[in-house]
Amino acid sequence: MRRYDPAGVLDSMEEVFRIGREAGVPVQISHFNSQAARVLPKVDEARARGVDVTYDLYCYLAGSSILAMQALPPSVQEGGITATLARLSDTRVRNELREWSKRRGPLDLVRLSYVEAKEYRKYEGWLLPDAIRAAGQDATDFVCDLLVASGMAAGCIAARTGSAVKRMCRP
């Protein structure tokens, strides 16, 4: 499925259901990770419309990802790596990211697992807030500079809070 974030999950689910209907095959949403109250009624609606849909949950308290997926909105990543790198170097885009990050919330539970850029490798294994403090930058500039220097090749472990895991499980 393309998106699991609150803004895109319902449209992504509809895309999955449409593909299943048009292909005449059952569909499986893998690593379903969203808010149960938001998405499970949509699964029930699809089943009522005749879509054979199942899902599995990502029930771990942390998951391996890429830093861009955790720290950037999809709109900044549109058009691939070259377009994204150009945006991340744009002061106007960085200012927009500062505002967006206030709505997204902190990245306190994100740990850098791999960084391509040699000058940032010293932060591998660090929690993102600790790396940001050590670098003496604000969060947006640190993340953008790291991603630009690494050509977007930066991995992370993103921890989930207990409440986020519980929201996905149906009683």
Image (cartoon, rainbow, N blue to C red):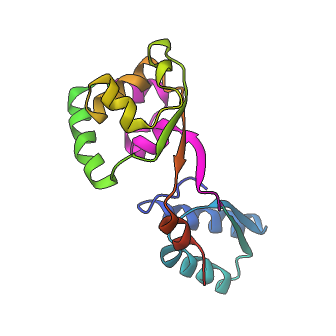
- What residue lies at 52% left-to-right and 51% top-to-bottom? 159
Q: Is residue 122 above or below residue 24?
A: above
Residue under the image location 34 percent in, 49 percent down: 106
x and y percentages locating residue 61 in the rendered image = 59, 56
Q: Residue furthest right?
A: 25
Q: Is residue 67 left or right of residue 40?
A: left
Residue situated furthest top in the rendering: 118
Residue 10 visible at all = no
In the picture, which quadrant includes the C terminus? bottom right
Nearer-the-camera pick, 27 or 120: 120
In the image, residue 162 above or below residue 160: below
Q: Nearer the viewer, residue 61 or 149?
A: 61
The answer to which image quadrant residue 31 occupies is bottom right
Q: How many marks?
A: 0
* Residue 107 placement (x, y as % from top left): 39, 46
User: Does residue 101 show up?
Assistant: yes
Q: Quadrant of the N terminus?
A: bottom right
Q: Nearer the viewer, residue 131 or 96?
A: 131
Q: Which residues are magenta?
A: 58-86
Instruction: Give yes or no for residue 63 being in the magenta stretch.
Output: yes
Whether residue 42 sits left or right of residue 5 in the image: it is right
- What is the quadrant of residue 29 in the picture? bottom right
* Relative height, residue 126 to residue 106 (above, below): above
